[in-house]
Image (tube, rainbow, N blue to C red):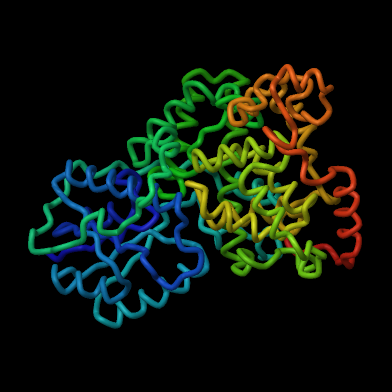
Amino acid sequence: MSASIVWFRQDLRLTDNPALQEAARCGGGVIPLFIAPAQEGLPWACGSASRWWLHHSLASLRAGLQKRGSRLIIREGGADTLLQVAEETGAERILWNRLYEPGHVERDHAIKARLQKGGLIVRSFNSALLHEPWEIKNSTHEAYRVFTPYWRAVQRLGLASPPIAAPPELPPVSNDVLGLSLDALELLPKIPWDTGLRESWNPGEKGALEQLEQFLGTGLAGYEGGRNRPDRTGTSRLSPHLHFGEIGPRQVVAAVNEWVHREPTPGLIKAGEAYLRELVWREFAYHLLFHFPTTAEDPLDPRFRCFPWADDYESSLPSWQQGLTGYPLVDAGMRELRRTGWMHNRVRMVVASLLTKNQRIPWQEGARWFWDTLVDADLANNTLGWQWSAGCGADAAPYFRIFNPVLQGQRFDPVGDYVRKWIPELSGLPHSYIHQPWAAPPLVLADAKVELGRTYPWPIIDLKQSRDEALAAFSTLRRSPTLPGET
């Protein structure tokens, strides 16, 4: 029987992997192959934090394959590499799970045509989403631009779909098929800045399943209130595992439903629905990027092409990047990001609002910084989040939303535990001043050993003045008719 090549990309798991299942079903040899994204010529290549995660995720996949009698072949290249491995192994089929980023879609179409021209059977599958982006359209057969009607459409189609079990064993790969070592990809940093990442995360399929189980046991019941509190462990923290495909959304939905049905109290049912709604936000991000492929760089709302962004921000951008804005909630978030490669979603919105609204720095600058520093850097979600925060994306609000970092901190980090964790130089301040140290009397600052301008910066920008300027800038945009897809 002929062999099948399973081309692993952002589906680094054995459970609920349709391409792998198809290879096992076909019988014959199964060649697990990873082609290093080395310089594929695509925009948005892996950032530093993502490369770190990818190394450990591949190590986990390699170990899982070895337990089943197989092994992972690592190569570099593109279509030529696939053809070469097919020739070496006698494979007649090449199977992969689909990617949806614009560059990948275009590349995969070209690769598929070339492989088929070479006489190979090529099939692709959906492992990353509950529904394909082209399956969900509005009443006029157009893509949705607003989440709520999209969410209703997903609910009508249904969320539950049983995940596929991992194959108990796989045929061995001949020793004649050679590959690179994982270390040869040089994904890990040469200067060891990754201590915080190693302390915070356990990449790989096993780590993903453990993280899901932990969330179900300790976070799901209080999810509705806890998900907005950065001072608590109230979110699932599954985003990097989902991005690298160490776990799939079908697995998450099945696990949440099973957990809720064990003890279906009204509160737990409501919490489960709230979490699944947030999971579908991820689907919505892919829906938008697929249908509007230029939005990784270009605003969804075309009016914002004329938005009067600040001209000179070379000095203020680094203050934001380094967590030295003088606004504790923002600085805590940016320091958490630098240390762990992750930031709580509520804080992401606040730091993005300060950058794009108060500082009026283009959202693309923030998106690029997040892309390099986040372990869950995902083009669809990163684009959705930044465009939403900047006001130029998929947001149904009829106004220009500007978050106040002081009020947000007082509401969602009320006693300052989150700020104190990431900004220890402010730990001595009482609750009433932890989010606005400049308002503290001199004696309070002295008792807390806080010296503004030396141990902690003064705010780099005035909130009220910058808010007024942002609203004035927004008012210059020409009014446009309702965008299509908002029904």
Q: Name above or below for residue 199 compared with residue 172.
A: above
Q: Residue 374: x percent and y percent?
A: 52, 48
Q: Residue at x 66, y 31 (%)?
A: 228
Q: Residue at x 35, y 46 (%)?
A: 16
Q: In this rendering, does residue 131 appear at all?
A: yes
Q: Is residue 453 left or right of residue 63?
A: right
Q: Quadrant of the C terminus?
A: bottom right
Q: Residue 252: x percent and y percent?
A: 46, 38
Q: Residue furthest bottom?
A: 117
Residue placed most toward the observer, 283 or 186? 186
Q: Residue 58: x percent and y percent?
A: 30, 49
Q: Is residue 268 left or right of residue 125?
A: right
Q: Name above or below for residue 203 compared with residue 413.
A: below
The image quarter containing residue 387 is bottom right
Q: Residue at x 67, y 48 (%)?
A: 319
The image quarter containing residue 313 is bottom right
Q: Residue 75: x percent and y percent?
A: 25, 64
Residue placed most toward the observer, 236 or 405? 405
Q: Is residue 125 left or right of residue 344?
A: left
The image quarter containing residue 166 is top left
Q: Is residue 296 left or right of residue 78?
A: right
Q: Residue at x 67, y 65 (%)?
A: 142
Q: In this rendering, does residue 487 appear at all?
A: no
Residue placed most toward the observer, 235 or 408? 408
Q: Quadrant of the N terminus?
A: bottom left
Label total for image = 0
